[in-house]
Amino acid sequence: MVALGARLSAAVGGPTAKALADGLDLQTVGDLLRHYPRRYVERGALTPFSELVVGEYATVVAEVTKATGRKIRPKLYKSDITIRGEDGGTMTLALFNRPWVEKELRTGRRAYFSGKVERFAQRVQLANPDYQLLDDEAGVLAEEFAGVLVPIYPAAAKAPSTTVARSVRHTLGMVDFGADPLPAELRERHGLIGLEQALRGIHTPAEPADVTLSRRRLTWDEAFVLQVVLAQRRATTRALAGTPRAARPGGLLEAFDGALPFTLTAGQVEIGAQLAGELSQPAPMYRLLQGEVGSGKTVVALRAMLQVVDSGGQAALLAPTEVLAQQHARSLRAMLGPLATAGELGAAEVATRVALLTGSQGAAARRTALEQAGNGAAGIVVGTHALLSEGVAFTDLGLVVVDEQHRFGVEQRDALRAKGRTPPHVLVMTATPIPRTIAMTVYGDLEVSTLSELPQGRAPVQTAVVPTGERPAWLETAWTRVREHIAAGRQAFVVCPRIGGDEPEERASDGRRPGVAVLDVHLMLVHGALNSLRVEMLHGRMAPEDKDAVMQRFTRGEIDVLVATTVIEVGVDVPNATVMVVLDADRFGVSQLHQLRGRVGRGSEPALCLLVTDTEQGHPSRVRLDAVASTSDGFVLSRVDLKHRREGDVLGSAQSGTRSSLRMLRLLRDEDLIREARAEAVAVVDEDLLLADHPALRQAVLDLLNEERADFLEKA
Ligand code: ADP
Ligand code: MG
């Protein structure tokens, strides 16, 4: 007997264990048994060749229709094996220097063939395939393929599906499944089968219903264990003793509200009150503020920061890039006006200061910022990762605001939290709003607030796809639109997928040309369509002070057109910019395009976003662009986006470990299941925070956390 946690070499031979580890990163018996079949073929059924995807490893079940061979060079013998798939399609496989294969692969025999799918002379082929006969001479099926449903596994060159299948069967015969991590009452309540039955059913189903039952149970495992981890995190955070930061009558916040040039939206008021209430409690607030692009999250965050400053504490605002940190500092100072000039002539009595701390700033500026953070002169400190470094200290850090959370890991947030005397309140902002259930998983240790309404008087952004494949002349029209907007006193963005210059000209794996580059497009526009305008560049390879200078000049209206990479994706706020041209728009994700588009239409002037692409109508990338053009609702688009991404990418760094541990769970499809699992997890954790009475569950939680840690280390 071997336990699920045992090394694979204890169950299968050393060489096989090594192949499974190298090829598929399977290390333990549990890893192998949770390497689920991708699909099943019915015994005897052949694989349709039309479904094969070039570039992938595939396993097909096929019948041999012809086998010949000959010596093509002195030391090179080639066998040509023709096989037939379900749809009657045939392919001829070339096997080299294995003359005996013709004896095994005789006409009429069935076998698994595994190899990388390639296109050769217009036809799909498996490159130098491995094979495994399904039946013996008499046509009797080999034991491992005797089920009604034959599992086909995700495979690698060194570990083809047949090797996985054989190892799994062998292992299933000797494994001790141990106690079930799902409590018995829970399984009963939700009609779930036990772990052993589920693992046997998924690998060696007797009938399709076994697969269905097993899948449901194994999906529950993933959802539930993840929700338990998140519930534990929330419970632990809530149990910390923080400092209440109550509002103060006659303070900064009141002065700020009194001077606001606009009325807050209903959502801003409501969430503002929610934050104010939670900040006044000793338990640290731990909240996510997600909001549609342009919904005014910054004001909400600033008001929370001012409340904390009023109560005698400090607030830190953590931004993902230097450009954004600088922009935040500048716009906070602008919004606060005289309220941010403490110590200067004419400052308001309640005034504070906004300090900026970034990695690239000069020594003198840095010294001043450090001093103001350390002695409390700055009520608000804005910065990049530099804020996390050891030399940065606060007098009394009461609130940490993290902008664009998806670029920060849990560990980095914790590093900043550790800088408070007591654990500070935490507010995370993200401009990529996602459905609530998914948010509860992706950001599951945070409570979620959502700003969905845009301020009044915002002109909607009109978005159109410019299909240069079908309509080459339309690109000229796009530049005409840009010139018109600029003639009317507005500004424009031109966004490119690449910087260019000395980057290697990598071709995408699908053979497409590389996307257009900022450096090239800038030159082309300066000497061509926009030669009468002030056109400049902004991209990640520029020195930070140059980037900042360009952004400032653009903000002041001294630049007409900014040719940029996605550095402008987040947070850039220039209301006078009303037109954006995204070149090779198909290279960007749906959410990214929605973010980009949010950079125009921030004022009351009608704005235009043109998505230029040469992809054909009906191509999946083109369909995504059409979706972006058809709606301005970020929540609708986030669903489109999620559908096109793998779960791991959805979860991203926010929950790094869950990436590898989610095999069955699909965030969009399984929303209901996730909701149920969350309720069950909260109930268990409320009763038994450390899972003392649930040892098997505790082990599953530890495994997940270990995976997360391993993932984090890998990335660091
Ligand atoms: P985002 O949610 O995308 O971060 P911002 O906070 O940057 O949005 O706000 C976008 C713009 O809208 C800013 O110029 C901000 O000053 C302005 N704004 C915020 N709230 C309101 C409001 N209630 N009415 C009018 N304008 C607002
Ligand atoms: Mg913002």
Image (cartoon, helix red, strand yellow):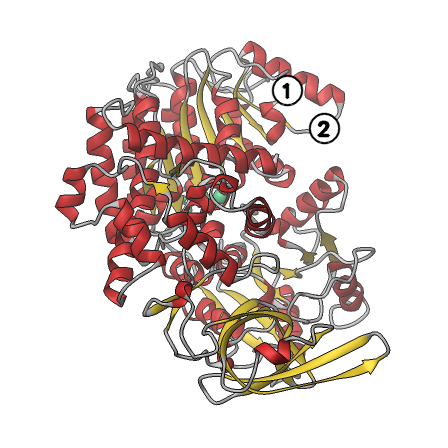
Where is residue 201 drawn, in percent x and y? 29, 56
The front one of 60 and 439 is 60
Label of residue 369 in the image: 1
Q: Mark 2 points at which residue?
A: 361
Label of residue 495 in the image: none
Question: Above or below — where is 703 with respect to 368?
Answer: below
Q: Do the residues labelled 2 and 1 touch (CB within 8 Å)?
A: yes
Furthest-right residue in this view: 74
The front one of 593 and 167 is 167
Local secondary structure at mark 1: helix
Q: Is residue 315 left or right of residue 690?
A: right
Local secondary structure at mark 2: loop
From the Cβ of disc 2, is ligand 2 less than 8 Å away? no
Q: Is residue 334 left or right of residue 313?
A: right
User: Which residue lies at the image location 47% right of the left edge and 46% below the top edge?
Assistant: 660
Position of the C terminus, as image quadrant, is top right
Where is residue 1 drawn, in percent x and y? 38, 38
Question: Above or below — where is 526 with respect to 614?
Answer: above
Q: Quadrant of residue 250?
A: top left
